[in-house]
Every structure is written in structure tokens, then in C-alpha cells.
């Protein structure tokens, strides 16, 4: 299946996207996006409960920012299997990024080939611009969730994950803050993942060592937001159970154990009596 969108800022009388941390892309004069989704289901062979799905995402968008700001083009080719990214090639970085480390051992992808495909998308984009009515596309604001990769233990290395979902178009900034200060070291991001409703999602990862009292923020900026969307995570010691609560639980467990022993003993002797009585009745007959 294939889908495409086109968008541009409205006429001078309509409101424009606000300036913000998106920098050169914050106020585009034109944004046009070509998005291609190729879905290949598993071969026939009987009804199966789960289908294997392979997705290829190709998009290219061209921005014309405010006067004096440099132009910024963005594009990506991403391959995904069963919801897991295999690799993506980014137009700006011009290299292949592998997300599943086992694949490069028996397969290779030349970034030049993917960049050639994006160049074709760019040419098609220019042709579509000439034919477009240049109406403004709809901005869909993202949602965000923040969590850790592993259970938290202070002093043990971990990874904070910021999952941004259900947004469009694919122009997004994710900023990490530690105690209010911006963090860059170790930050990694995935490509844009396609969703069935034609929105996109993205993961960002921050390796860190949790220390008591530290707090971390994932700040998301997107054209669909009036202000940045911020999620905060606090590092703190797990709250221990009060001593009185521990004593109550311990005593309750002991009482249940004793009750079980008494009940089992009573049932055992009652069963023996019934067996003895049945034996006597059968002997009298």
C-alpha cells in the first residue's frame, strides 16, 4: 500500500508555525513529504494466528526556512520486520545505521544505493511541488512515555527510554536534560517508525547511572505542539516497608502456616477414623 502527503505553510494572513528549538526547520515556507509503505505479508500456507510483516519506509521532505537560515532537507529509508527496525539510512548523516547487530554478519547495505533512491524521491518531490495546490498539511501532536530499560538500583548503569508516538510530520527534536542541564553524551535515536494510522513514532535512549536525588527530563518539540512536551523521571531509593508492616506480614504468614498445619492434622485423623469405621462395618457383614 502507498500513501502520500503534501503540506505548506498557509498564506501570509494565516498563522505560521512558531519559532523554537527546531532551528532552521521551525518556520518552513514549504514542506512536502512523500511517504511509501511497502507491506509484505507471509506466504500462503494455511491460516496462521500471527502474520510476519516486513515494512519499508521511504520519505523525503524539503524545507525552505526563514530568510538567512540554511535550507535543511530530511529523508530516510528504513527497513523493519515484526515491529523491529533492522536498519535505516539517513539523508543528513549519509550512512547505514544497524539496529539489529546480528544482520551485518551475513548481509550488507550500501548507503549510496539508499541515498540514490532518496535522490529519486527528491526529484519526484520537485515534480509534485509544481503540480501541488500547496495547501497546508495537518500537524498531529505527539504523545510521549519515559521509562527505564531495567529495574532501577542506585549506582547501577541503566538506560532511560523516551518513546514518542502518534505524530506527523516527521520533524521532531528530542532533548535530554539532567538536573536541568542538557545532556548529549551517549544519546541514541532510532529512525521514524510508521504506524497503521499513517502517523510515526521514534525512540531515544540515554545511558545513565541513577543517583539519589537526580532527575531527568525528556523534552519533545514538534510543530503540532504549542509548547515542548516534557516527561520527568526521578532517581530515588526504593521505599522500604515500615518495620511495623514487615512484622504484621511476618506474623500473618506464621499464623496462616500454623492454621494450615492444624487443619491438615484434623483432616488426617478424621480420615483415619472414617476408614477404621468402614473397615469394621464391612467385617460385621
Image (cartoon, rainbow, N blue to C red):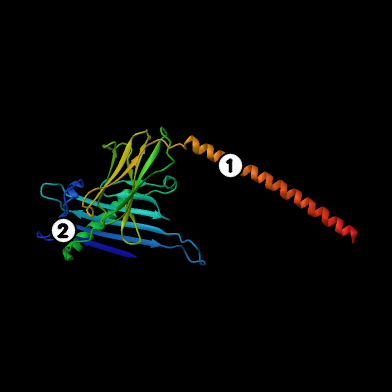
Element carrying mark 1: helix
In front: label 1 or label 2: 1
Q: CA distance from mark 1 to mark 2?
A: 67 Å
Which residue lies at the image location 56% right of the left edge and 38% below the top edge? 250
Return the residue at label 2: 9
Figure quadrant of residue 240: top left
Nearer-the-camera pick, 242 or 36: 242
Question: Where residue 194 appears, x then y in whole percent?
Answer: 34, 57
Sooner in the amino-acid sequence: mark 1 or mark 2: 2
Q: Position of residue 30 (x, y in %)?
A: 16, 57
If the image is split into quadrants, where does the N terminus sit? bottom left
Residue at the limit of the structure toward the right, as seen here: 284
Instruction: Return the mark for residue 253.
Output: 1
Say which of 117 and 212 sits in front.
Answer: 212
On the rendered image, what quadrant is the C terminus found in? bottom right
What residue lies at 43% left-to-right and 37% top-to-bottom?
A: 239
Amino acid at each position: 500500500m502507498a500513501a502520500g502527503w503534501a503540506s505548506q505553510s498557509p498564506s501570509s494572513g494565516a498563522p505560521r508555525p512558531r519559532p523554537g528549538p527546531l532551528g532552521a526547520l521551525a518556520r518552513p515556507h514549504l514542506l512536502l513529504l512523500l511517504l511509501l509503505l511497502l507491506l509484505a505479508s507471509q506466504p500462503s500456507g494455511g491460516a496462521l494466528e500471527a502474520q510476519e510483516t516486513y515494512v519499508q519506509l521511504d520519505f523525503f521532505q524539503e524545507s525552505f526556512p526563514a530568510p538567512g537560515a540554511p535550507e535543511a532537507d530530511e529523508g530516510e529509508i528504513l527497513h523493519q520486520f515484526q515491529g523491529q527496525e533492522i536498519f535505516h539510512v539517513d539523508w543528513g548523516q549519509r550512512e547505514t545505521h544497524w539496529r539489529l547487530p546480528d544482520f551485518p554478519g551475513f548481509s550488507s547495505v550500501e548507503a549510496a544505493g539508499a541515498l540514490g533512491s532518496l535522490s529519486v524521491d527528491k526529484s519526484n518531490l520537485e515534480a509534485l511541488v509544481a503540480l501541488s495546490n500547496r495547501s497546508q498539511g495537518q500537524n498531529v501532536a505527539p504523545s510521549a512515555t519515559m521509562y527505564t530499560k531495567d529495574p532501577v538500583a542506585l549506582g547501577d548503569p541503566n538506560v532511560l527510554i523516551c518513546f514518542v508516538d502518534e505524530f506527523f510530520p516527521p520533524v521532531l527534536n528530542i532533548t535530554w536534560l539532567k538536573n536541568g542541564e542538557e545532556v548529549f553524551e551517549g544519546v541514541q535515536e532510532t529512525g521514524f517508525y510508521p504506524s497503521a494510522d499513517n502517523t510515526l513514532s521514534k525512540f531515544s535512549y540515554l545511558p545513565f547511572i541513577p543517583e539519589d536525588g537526580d532527575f531527568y527530563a525528556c523534552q519533545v518539540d514538534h510543530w503540532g505542539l504549542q509548547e515542548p512536551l516534557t516527561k520527568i523521571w526521578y532517581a530515588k531509593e526504593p521505599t522500604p516497608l515500615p518495620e511495623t508492616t514487615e512484622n504484621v506480614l511476618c506474623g500473618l504468614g506464621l499464623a496462616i502456616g500454623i492454621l494450615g498445619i492444624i487443619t491438615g492434622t484434623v483432616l488426617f485423623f478424621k480420615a483415619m477414623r472414617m476408614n477404621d469405621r468402614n473397615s469394621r462395618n464391612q467385617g460385621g457383614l
